[in-house]
Amino acid sequence: MASTPVELSEKGFEEYVEEHLLNDGYIKGNPADFSKEYAIDTEILFEFLEDTQPKKVQRLKEIYKDQYRSKVLNRLDTELKKRGIIDVLRHGIKDYGTYIDLVYFKPASELNIELFELYQKNRISVIRQVRYSLRNNNSVDMLICVNGLPVVVMELKNPFTGQTYEDAIMQYKKDRNPYELLFQFKKRTIVFFAVDTSEVYMTTKLDGDKTSFLPFNKGDRGGKGNPSNPNGLKTAYLWEEILEKDSLLDILKRFVFIESEERKDVDGNTYLAYEKVIFPRYHQLDAVRRLEANAKEKGVGTNYLIQHSAGSGKTNSISWLAHRLANLHDEKNDAVFDSVIVVTDRRALDQQLQDRIYQLEHKHGVVEKIDKDSNQLADSIKGGTRIIISTLQKFPFIIEKVGELKERKYAVIIDEAHSSTAGESMASLREVLSANTLDEAIKLDEENQDYDPEEEILKVIKKRGEQPNISFFAFTATPKAKTLEMFGTTGESGLPYPFHLYSMRQAIEEGFILDVLQNYVTYETYFKLAKRIEDDPCFERAKATKALTRYVSLHPHNIAQKTEIIVEHFINVTRHKIGGRAKAMVVTSSRLHAVRYKHAFDEYIKKKGYKDIKTLIAFSGTVEDHGLEYTESGMNRFKESEFPEQFATDEYQVLLVAEKYQTGFDQPLLHTMYVDKKLSGVKAVQTLSRLNRTCAGKEDTFVLDFVNKAEEIQYAFRPYYQATILKEATEPNLLYDIENELHAYGAYGI
């Protein structure tokens, strides 16, 4: 159903979308039937109940007599407010001992004729211009209900009449009171869309000016937005695909869930820190559904590479995929996989998976975490546990055991094959690194850095050869060439490519991660900057200018000089970022470098009397220096396992690392990175990407690189970024801008 600007101006955007939904099997709801008191379309609700559960309805009528409707509505309202609409839709309610279903989800097989017929009796309705308030006459453009219960609200804006999705967002923030029953978090509407003819945004919680909207767009040529649609509007996928009846009910049953986190206060009491309704982003929904459909079509034995950038929500995508693969049946109604094995080093994933799958299935024991020994893992694999979670370190054993059970079929999901604590081979972890010079320490560390989880996984798979009873689903933001070859899908050119892509560029443009190259500066730039200031007649040779010249002309070669530069920059610039909570990482060339940096930092901080900066160190094994032995836990004075939690506190600001935590470490408060190590290829991308996580108050990042060249870093990012724009200072005016920013903060250590 193509559309033109003329049609939209004549017909109206709302009418256009409504017409499609009605043609797709929706029911046209009557605004007059929408109860403001209950925020429910009561007519459609009771039509559904009487059509699908007549005996139960008759029993309630006999009990409640002429109060039947009001009593059922009061009971439903109570349960919606207590348990939330997601749980009520999935598990129904009990009223006077009578169990009532509020929706029938699609059965796994159409062989169950009775359930399939009930599924077809669901009433998905669309109502335009719904007046929802008992206080005023405000209305929403479009409301979608499932059997009378509100699940989707849409505000549609037509650019041909001068409005866009941004006007819809402002309307939600300014004119939609979150205390109105229709908008109350969890209790009624699940998702709110702001839509125009080009873009879609969504939120699951209205909160006035603090409401946070996320893009719900397909992406366009690797970036944000939506591609041109030869058959209609750019945003037609929303009502043609996502809100299609089967799709919407599938999302409500198998995607939407509530994410929560409990924390402990100072007295050790547990409290609910936050709660979110999670509705899948477009690329998550698309990836999971496409993977599921392809696995159903091709069966076991196919490999998939999912290249999803940081900020893509991989944890949720993996959770949804694991659940769907564990329940996947082919056309003959046979299970495609006997077990799904998730290989990960994410510490929280097992509990998150447990929680999410319980919400989706209302069953315990679906997920088993392997936290004991190899016997537990072997028993789970042999016993057909539906979802097994294990670590990257156990991967060789997993492949060996699965290979022995050729009659059974397995899906193996590999989660970002790198570990934040990796860096040296397992043998070298037990060794004492003893080097006489820093150059020797670099050489020794490079020789010992032969443990790359991604490489080890590829080696294990190649060693075992082709295993037709396993399908691999590999998630990574930064696939190496070998990984593409192993897991990629072969294109028409004969070259492998990712089965699904959510690029770094799209994640940056959509605001899910920050662009770490936006404020990347090599140390060389400081010399150019100093020269620019000295030669600029607009600048007097004031104290700050002289300090800058002295500061950068150090051209540091030793750790003490670099320590002074780093600490002064942190004190004058970084510590003011993110509301005064910003943290920094110093990437060192070896474990010995890290140890000496730690001593230099602590000495310099003490000498200057700085109170707002405290350091931690991260490295593996034991380092010997001047006859003394050092370990990470010994220098930090707490256990290695406590590190992430300790660094997250306000007590520590700077992290000195030697290989550890350069990959797979997410700390949103990391704002600045000081690089004193040669980086290239995927390692450069993974290292600098430690800064890209977003959080409240974080508007930018900063990298000061003592070693690498800008063009080398740009080259490293290009395969994953798609549109790298590196603001390295080759243009004098750009230097001038950088100088202004630094000058404003007094960043030069006067």
Image (cartoon, helix red, strand yellow):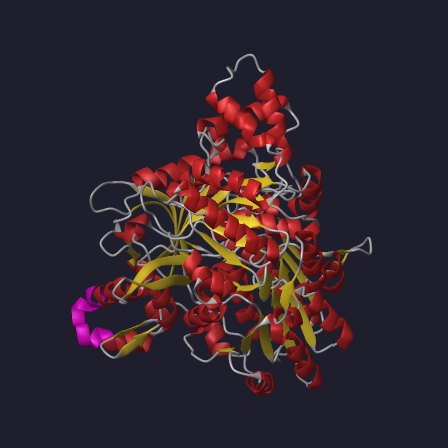
Q: Is residue 262 above or below residue 331?
A: above
Residue visible at 23% across and 75% down in the picture: 60
Q: Residue 392: percent from the left, percent from the top?
A: 61, 70
Q: Residue 355: percent from the left, percent from the top?
A: 42, 70
Q: Residue 695: percent from the left, percent from the top?
A: 43, 47
Q: Between residues 642 and 58, which one lies in front from this camera angle?
A: 642
Q: Is residue 97 above or below residue 600?
A: below
Residue visible at 43% across and 63% down in the picture: 637
Give the quarter of the image for residue 236: top right
Q: Is residue 640 above or below residue 98?
A: above
Residue at the far right: name it.
494
Please identify the quadrant where the N terminus is shown.
top right
Magenta-highlighted residues: 60-71
Give the quarter of the image for residue 717: top right
Residue 68 magenta-drawn?
yes
Q: Is residue 620 left or right of residue 168?
A: right
